[in-house]
C-alpha cells in the first residue's frame, strides 16, 4: 500500500530558530519514516510580504534548506522543493480564489494577527496590505492539495490556515465532484514556542528568536537579556520559574538538571546569572552537532542545489498529475493533447 502523504512548508524569510525546530521540524524528522513527505520552501508565499526584498528571499531559500538538512530532514527519504518551480501551484491558486470570499480571508485569525504585527513593527496602514498577502491562505491551500497532502504537520499558528484549506477543498469537491484530498493538521508536542521576550510566538519576523545557526556569542548575548521574573530583584529572592523564559528554555532543551533548576529558583538558592550561564552551556551542547552538519552543507553548496533540483523535478510530476484531475473535474480539459 502507498504511504500517506505529508505536505508542509517553510518560508525563506530567515534562518530557522528554536520555534521551528521544537514547534514543527522535530516532528517532520520523525514523520518522514512513516509518510511520503514533501517539504516546500515557500518562496512565493515569502514574496507576498517581501516582494520588495527579492535578495532576502533568494538567499534564504538555500539557508532554510541547509537548516532543514542539518536538523535531520533526509533527502533520501523526503522531497525538498522550491514552490516557485511548480507553476501548477499558481494555477490552482487562481481556481481556488473563486471559492473563498474576501470577508472570510480577512477573518482568518492568523492573517489578522500577522497584519496587526506588521502594523506594530512597521507602522503600516491598512492600505499597504496587498491582495497577494491577504490571499496567501488560498495559495497555501494550493500547496497542500497539489501534493494530495493528507497530513500537514505544523505549529499552532497554522491551524486557521489548514481550516481554510479544508473549507476550500469541501467547496471544490461539492461543486466539481470528489477530486481533492481533505487534509488534517498534525501538531508537535510543543506547538507554540515562545520568544525571548516572552511573546507567545518566537518568530523570524518578530526579532525575538534564537537561531539554530547562532554563534556562542549570539547565544550568550540573547540569553543574558532574556525575560525573567520581574519580581526577583536580588540574587537570593525566591522567584516564579513559570514566568521566566530562561526556565522555559531549560525545560524545552530537556536539561537533566531541571528539578534542581526549578527548586533552587523557587527558594532563592540560585541567581539568574548562574541559571542563564547553565542554559548557555546546555544550548551550545544541543547546537554543536547541528552546526557541524550545517558547516558541511555550507561548504558543499552544489550538493544543496542538487537536492533542490531533484526534489523540485519530482514534486512537479506529482503536481502535474493533480492538475490534470482538477482540469477534468472543472471541465476545462478541452483537448487531449498538451498545448
Ligand atoms: P514568518 O515570520 O516569516 O512567517 P515564521 O517564523 O512564522 O516566519 P514560517 O516559515 O512561517 O516561520 O513557519 C514554518 C513552520 O514553523 C510552521 O509550521 C510554523 O507553524 C512553525 N513555527 C514557526 N514559529 C513557531 C513557533 N514559535 N512555535 C511553533 N511552531 C512555529
Ligand atoms: Mg509564519
Image: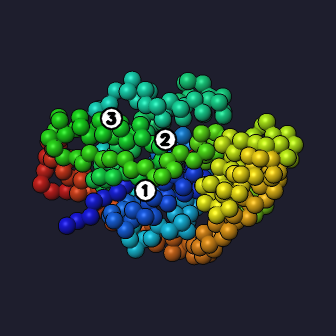
- State which tag comes first along the sequence, 3 or 1: 1
Q: Please provide percent x and percent y for residue 212.
A: 63, 60
Q: Please provide percent x and percent y for residue 148.
A: 28, 53
Secondary element at tag 2: helix
Which residue is identified by label 1? 40
Tag 3–tag 1 contact (CB < 8 Å) = no
* Mark 3: C-beta under 8 Å from nearest atom of ligand 2: no
> Is disc 3 surrounded by few (<14), some (14 to 19) or many (20+) residues within 10 Å?
some
Secondary element at tag 3: helix
Judged from this view, the residue extending furthest toward the right is: 234
In the rendered view, tell whether residue 96 sits above or below residue 290. Answer: above
Classify residue 119 by image quadrant.
Answer: top right
Distance Cα–Cα, label 2 vs label 3: 22 Å
Distance Cα–Cα, label 2 vs label 1: 17 Å
Residue placed most toward the observer, 109 or 189:
189
* Left or right placement of residue 317 versus residue 239 in this view: left
Residue placed most toward the observer, 68 or 197:
197
Distance Cα–Cα, label 3 vs label 1: 21 Å
**Number of the front mark, 3 or 1:** 1
Q: How is the image coloured?
A: rainbow
> Is disc 1 surrounded by few (<14), some (14 to 19) or many (20+) residues within 10 Å?
many
Secondary element at tag 1: strand
At 49% across and 60% down in the image, what residue appears? 26
* Mark 2: C-beta under 8 Å from nearest atom of ligand 1: yes
- State which tag comes first along the sequence, 2 or 1: 1
Which residue is identified by label 2? 157
Which residue is identified by label 3? 97
Q: Please provide percent x and percent y for residue 222.
A: 75, 52
Amino acid at each position: 500500500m502507498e504511504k500517506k502523504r505529508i505536505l508542509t512548508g517553510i518560508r525563506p524569510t530567515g534562518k530557522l530558530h528554536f520555534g521551528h525546530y521544537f514547534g514543527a521540524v522535530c516532528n517532520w524528522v520523525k514523520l518522514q519514516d512513516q509518510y511520503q513527505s514533501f517539504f516546500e520552501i515557500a518562496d512565493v508565499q515569502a514574496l507576498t510580504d517581501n516582494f520588495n526584498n527579492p535578495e532576502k528571499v533568494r538567499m534564504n531559500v538555500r539557508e532554510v534548506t541547509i537548516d532543514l538538512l542539518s536538523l535531520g530532514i533526509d533527502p533520501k527519504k523526503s522531497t525538498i522543493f522550491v514552490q516557485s518551480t511548480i507553476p501548477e501551484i499558481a494555477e490552482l491558486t487562481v481556481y481556488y480564489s473563486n471559492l473563498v470570499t474576501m470577508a472570510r480571508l480577512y477573518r482568518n485569525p492568523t492573517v489578522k494577527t500577522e497584519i496587526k504585527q506588521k502594523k506594530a513593527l512597521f507602522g503600516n496602514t491598512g492600505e499597504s496590505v496587498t491582495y497577494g498577502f491577504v490571499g496567501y491562505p488560498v495559495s497555501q491551500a494550493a500547496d497542500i492539495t497539489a501534493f494530495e497532502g493528507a497530513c500537514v504537520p505544523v505549529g499552532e499558528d497554522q491551524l486557521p490556515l489548514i481550516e481554510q484549506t479544508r473549507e476550500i477543498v469541501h467547496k471544490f469537491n461539492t461543486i466539481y465532484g470528489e477530486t481533492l484530498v481533505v487534509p488534517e493538521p498534525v501538531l508537535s508536542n510543543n506547538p507554540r514556542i515562545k520568544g525571548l521576550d516572552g511573546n507567545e510566538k518566537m518568530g523570524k519576523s518578530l526579532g525575538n528568536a534564537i537561531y539554530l545557526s547562532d554563534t556562542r556569542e549570539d547565544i550568550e548575548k540573547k540569553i543574558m537579556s532574556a525575560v525573567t521574573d520581574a519580581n526577583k530583584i536580588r540574587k537570593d529572592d525566591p522567584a516564579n520559574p513559570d514566568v521566566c523564559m530562561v526556565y522555559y528554555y531549560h525545560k524545552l532543551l530537556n536539561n537533566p538538571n531541571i528539578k534542581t533548576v526549578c527548586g533552587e529558583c523557587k527558594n532563592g538558592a540560585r541567581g539568574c546569572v548562574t541559571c542563564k550561564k547553565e542554559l548557555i552551556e546546555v544550548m551550545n551542547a544541543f547546537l554543536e552537532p547541528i552546526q557541524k552538519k550545517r558547516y558541511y552543507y555550507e561548504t558543499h553548496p552544489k550538493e544543496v542545489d542538487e537536492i533542490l533540483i531533484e526534489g523540485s523535478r519530482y514534486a512537479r510530476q506529482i503536481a502535474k498529475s493533480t492538475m490534470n484531475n482538477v482540469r477534468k473535474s472543472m471541465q476545462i480539459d478541452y483537448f487531449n493533447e498538451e498545448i
